[in-house]
Structure formats: C-alpha cells, structure tokens
Image (cartoon, rainbow, N blue to C red):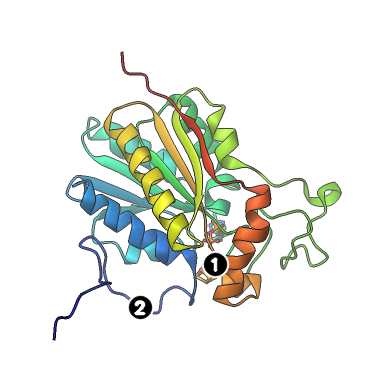
Amino acid sequence: MIKEKVYGVPKYGVAYPGLLCPGCGHGIVRHMIAEVLEEMDLGEKAIHVGGMGCTGYVTFTLRLDQMSCTHGTGPALATGVKRGLNGKPFVFTYQGDGDAMAIGAGALINAAARGEKITVIMGNNANYGTTGGQMAPTTLIGQKTTTTPMGRDPELHGYPQRTAELLATIEGVAYSARGSVSSPANYQKVKKMLKTAFQKQLDGEGLSFLEILVACPTDWKKTPAESLKWIDEVLTKTYPLGEIKNISRKK
Ligand SMILES: Cc1ncc(C[n+]2csc(CCOP(=O)(O)OP(=O)(O)O)c2C)c(N)n1
Ligand code: SF4
C-alpha cells in the first residue's frame, strides 16, 4: 500500500500538543512561520522574539534561536538583536494584538518610524486571549468581552485600531498587509504575504508588518468552526484582507 504523508511537524517546529486551545489560530500561524522559514532557507539565521500572551506558546513550539521579553517590548528587543549583531540575523516577532498595539504600541510605532529591518507579525484575535478575554484595541464595536459585557461602546471605550493601515502610513515601513487563517485558501494567501514580508527584510527595505486574523474560540465562546465563520463574516468587515503597502527602495 502506498501511503502519502499529508501532514507533519515542520522542520523548525516542535510537536508540543496541549498548549493552545483547540481551534486557536496561533497554532496555524506557528505552522506557517515554520514552513516559510524552511522554504526560504532562513531557519539557521533566524531569531524569533516571542510575544507575551498566548503567542508565547508559539515560542515553545518553534525549533529556532529565540528570545522572550516583557509584554509589548518585542520590536525594541528585536531592534537590539538586529543592530547588535550588525544586521546579520533574520529577526522577527510574533505578537498578539494586545501585546503589539496596547502596551506595546510605543515600541512598535517607533521601531516602524526608525525603519528597523525587522518583521513584525501580529495575530489579531480582537481580545486579550491569555488573561481571560478582556477588550483589546482591536475589539469590534458591540463586541462583548469580560471588560465590555454590554458590548464595546465607542463613547466609553473608543474605536477599534486598524494596525496594518496605521503602520502603512509610517515612512519606515516597507510592507504592511493583513491576512487571515480562516480557510485553506486564506492560509495560502497569507503565506504569500509572509514570504513578501520576509523578503523585504532580506532586501533591507525597512520594517515589514503582517497582521493575521486568528481565532480565539475559548474567549469568543464559540466552537472552532463558528469562530472561522465569524472571522470571515464579521471580523473582516472591520479588518479587510489584502496588501496595504508594498514599496521598494531599491535603486
Ligand atoms: C507588564 C504586564 N502587564 C500585564 C500582563 C498580563 N498579560 C499577559 S498577556 C496579556 C494580554 C495578551 O493579549 P494579546 O497580546 O492580545 O495576546 P493573546 O493572548 O490574545 O494571543 C496581558 C495583559 C503582563 N504579562 N505584563
Ligand atoms: S485563550 Fe484564545 S488565544 Fe489563548 S490559546 Fe486559547 S484560543 Fe488561543
């Protein structure tokens, strides 16, 4: 009998089951990052700066040189690693939306303004997953969280932050895009975006940013299948998918 292997642990991944909840989108992004590092032959020179939050579990399941840092400081540490090693390593962060755009907004925006040659990947699940589902800057208007039990009210809680669009306005940013891992087709599209973002860093064009819509079934109080549907039918209305900025500074 001929057996075809259709799924396996990627070369730069580690099988470490049980860390993330069933249906969590962070695990899918982890798989994609490992696949892309292998396909672009970057695994040996890559340094991952891990986020604080459920994205921290991604750090446990990558087989790479990695560092962890305090909440929100990923782009600052990534800057130090990249510059301190004379630009030689390939440096990326994987952060949650709370990590990157609440406590970490200053670190991210200033790394972007400096045009650091790093890649920031942000998993947007529209809440603080780890700590029990509080409102994040990305929480939708009307979305119920533990800190907005009646739904997010712009008068009280402000408006959702569109990070990929914001980053695109910053001159030091060479690439900014948003994808989703809600279906195999979207997985392939965002994988292409990730490769472009990584290539921007290799070409020294500036900071590259990729926002990925990821499911958090536990705190959304939905099944994994309902969560994927909610991403496609609801979350993408506020966070449309696609490339927002893609520039080349090559002469
Ligand atoms: C300085 C500091 N403040 C607060 C916390 C608690 N904390 C840990 S993770 C987190 C939020 C994580 O949310 P997000 O970045 O959106 O990631 P997710 O867990 O949803 O993937 C918070 C507030 C902390 N670890 N350090
Ligand atoms: S709480 Fe949400 S983000 Fe955290 S592991 Fe569970 S599903 Fe993923």
Residue lying at 29% horizontally and 51% vertically, measured from the top left:
36
x and y percentages locating residue 94 in the rendered image: 42, 52
Q: Report helix, strand or loop for mark 1.
A: loop
User: Image quarter for residue 131?
Assistant: bottom right
- Along the viewing direction, whichever of 42 and 156 lies nearer the viewer: 42
Q: Residue furthest bottom?
A: 1
Q: Furthest-top residue in view?
A: 251
Q: x and y percent of residue 231 in the render? A: 60, 60
Spatial CA distance of label 2 from label 1 is 17 Å
Taking the spot 20% from the left edge, 75% from the top edge, the residue there is 4
Q: Residue at x 46, y 44 (%)?
A: 210
Residue at 30% from the left image edge and 36% from the top image edge: 199
Classify residue 105 as left or right of residue 83. Answer: right
Task: Give the mark, 2 or 1, whose residue is nearer the N terminus.
Answer: 2
The residue labelled by disc 2 is: 17
The residue singled out by tag 1 in the image is 130
> Does the numbered disc 1 mark a residue whose Cβ is under 8 Å from ligand 1?
yes
